[in-house]
Image (cartoon, grey):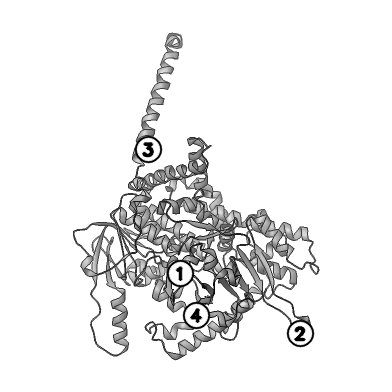
Amino acid sequence: MIFAALFPVLPPLLGYSSVGILVLLLLVARWVRKWSQIPGTHLTKDQIHPMRAEHFTSEKVDPSVVWDTIVIGSGSGGCACANLLAQAGQRVLILEQHPDRSGGCTHSFRQQNCEWDTGLHYTSTCMSDATQRAGALLHFMTKGLQKWKQLPDPYDQVVFPTSGDGDSQQPPVYYSFVQGADATIESILKDMDLSTSYLSIDILRDRCEEWMKLCRLINDGFTALGLSRILPPFLHFLLGRRLNQLYKLASYTVRDVQYAVFNLGYTKADLLSVKQCPTAPPGAEPDPVLRRLKAVLTHPIGDYAVQPRDATFAAHGITMAHYMEGASYTVGPTQNISIRSTSVVRALRGEIWVDATVKEIILDEKTGRAIGVKVQSTSQLAEWKKFCEEGKEVPPPAEVEIRARKAVVCATGVYNLYNKLLPPQHPVVQSFQQCPSQRSIEPSNGHIFLFCKIKGDAATLKLPEHNVWYFNDDDMDGAFDRYFANPTEHRPPTVYIGFPCTKDPTWPQRFPGVSNCILISDGLWEWFTPWENKPVHLRGSEYEAFKEKLARHLLDILLESVPQLSMDQIEYWTLGTPLSEVTYLSSYHGGSYGTKCTPEMFATINRGWTTNPRTSIPGLFVAGSDAFLPAVCGAMYGGCLGASAVLGWTGSLRLFLGFWNYYATIILEESPKLSKWQAYRLAFRRFVSD
């Protein structure tokens, strides 16, 4: 009876209901659009005036200026964090300890009428393509001011040196890495001598493809890990499978995964189903073909700097996947990235000061909350240390307190944070020091850098546009062991050789008739501890003699690997060591990548220390490599996660909606045939899956 009575009025009632729902949805959509209009979305590149950072002085500290967040460090992670916070509406102060420039590992420097980059020697296509997630984020943070050049194939070449003596001497062998996993596999197999292999080329190809599939799976896992740091905990079940796969593969070493895949024929499914990855036998791989193939496929080992026996497969997988579609380089010096990113911060009421060494993070005595920092002038500190070395009694430079209303973000690594910036008696610091009961991670190794100025332009000298990676031996672990035991007698296991002058299209106009080259090899902190307390440029003759021996190895490798060059053409060179990384990058023990990329990095005991932007101290957060992953792109994502942690779930949602709208607009500009709905859907899909 009730249904019969209602039946005549149901259709109009449903009609009114549908109209009401539609109106409500339109109102909600309008509110969301307005709510997501963060301050950064109104900023255009015409309103940004890129300029170098100002120098810190105590006179510039105005007590009436209220900073919302203070970010320590202006590397890729610190810049990203500060930029996003500023675009979300916060007033941000960035403090950089370098005496005269921002950028961390993205900064560049000049000497002898030449220029070199220091950490960003190339990056992946995804960083330069504004329609992909990483590229869209960088476009958003620089408002499109940062331009890139796509590098042609091959973007990397691995070279093994001349072998044998006399009539049996074999020339150097080159293996090319190109865009696309399948194309790279074919390129590598084409240049290998497979005549002595007990495996057919089809089997080797299948196993190489399985290797690439595992790398892509690692990439998917890290996307899930990043999302888990943004989403509230009740949504983490959506990411459970991918996270479990990541943590399982991350517990394996590169050497063991190579043994499982190439020697035993394990597939991706096999490695995910077994309780433990098979352990590779000790010593060098006995089969010469597999030994060479495995060595080639440890590339790009130089981008995470841990030998195969110790490296987590997660580090290799994400790095391999990162470059799978090619590489690119900045148009103009790499320094421009930080200048443009921090200029956005300054346009939104923020500021960046260089020559500002943070000595301590201030904690509230009652609540334990991070509320500010104590700062000293870097150049004045260096001068004071020099006076002390000379036996002069002079007072140290004054400390200045700067307060933050909402947060302090450390973008210089967890080792600096817990060993230098917090009170040693603090319970969290005490817990960090209890290794291995509370922590089993360790700092990464450092590097040796040789910066060369070369007479003549790159075109005349026929310098390669691609990177050359010198591999000393195809027994990778053996080569590392020998070098680490005696670096002056043995050559480095791997050496990066790059010519920025061939990659940057502005170079010929900026430095006519001059070329540059950078060589990078591994370096242990332990080699340099006798001089760690000596001021820069005053470390004595023994230090200089040690550097000379290391440099000679690298110069010999350069001339062998790029035979068109001669020593007469190298007009100037200078060598940097892990001590240089301490001085100019504030790296803890000269480490280049924050936390060392071993399986321990992802162990449960360490998840509160690394790959995490949050700390257990209220108001204190982490950005950069130790908030997510090492290298420039990983640190940038770590900066994004640090900003998200500071903003909280609601603030992060608002920031995401603002970025999503920006990202969809970029996609529409690149593909005008797409509808607006399609552009938003594509932007969302790429954000959660790239």
Whichever of labels 3 and 1 marks the residue nearer the N terminus, that label is: 3
**Measuring 46% from the left and 90% from the top, which residue is drawn there?**
542
Q: Nearer the viewer, mark 4 or mark 2?
A: 4
Q: Mark 4 sits on what residue?
A: 573
| Residue in the foreground of this view, choosing between 315 and 82 | 82
Would you say the residues marked 1 and 4 are in contact, meaning their CB atoms lie under 8 Å apart?
Answer: no
| Residue in the foreground of this view, choosing between 212 and 286 | 212
Tell me the SS state at disc 1: loop
- Determine whether, in the image, residue 397 is placed left or right of residue 458: left
The circle drawn on residue 144 is none
- Determine whether, in the image, residue 586 is placed left or right of residue 267: left
Q: Nearer the viewer, mark 1 or mark 4?
A: 4
* Residue 615 visible: no
Residue 616 rendering spot, x and y as whole percentages = 36, 60
Q: Nearer the viewer, mark 2 or mark 3?
A: 2
Residue 665 rendering spot, x and y as whole percentages = 45, 42
Q: Residues within 10 Å of mark 1 (few under 14, many from 20)?
A: few
Residue 24 rendering spot, x and y as whole percentages = 37, 28
| Residue in the foreground of this view, choosing between 281 and 117 | 117
Whichever of labels 4 and 2 marks the residue nearer the N terminus, that label is: 2
- Determine whether, in the image, residue 15 is placed left or right of residue 564: left
Residue 69 rendering spot, x and y as whole percentages = 30, 57
Q: Relative to 159, say whether 38 is above or below.
A: above
The circle drawn on residue 33 is 3
Whichever of labels 1 and 4 marks the residue nearer the N terminus, that label is: 1
Q: Mark 1 sits on what residue?
A: 437
Q: Amino acid at mark 4?
A: Trp
Q: Amino acid at mark 1?
A: Ser
Tell me the SS state at disc 4: strand
Q: Residues within 10 Å of mark 2 (few under 14, many from 20)?
A: few
Would you say the residues marked 3 and 4 are in contact, meaning their CB atoms lie under 8 Å apart?
Answer: no
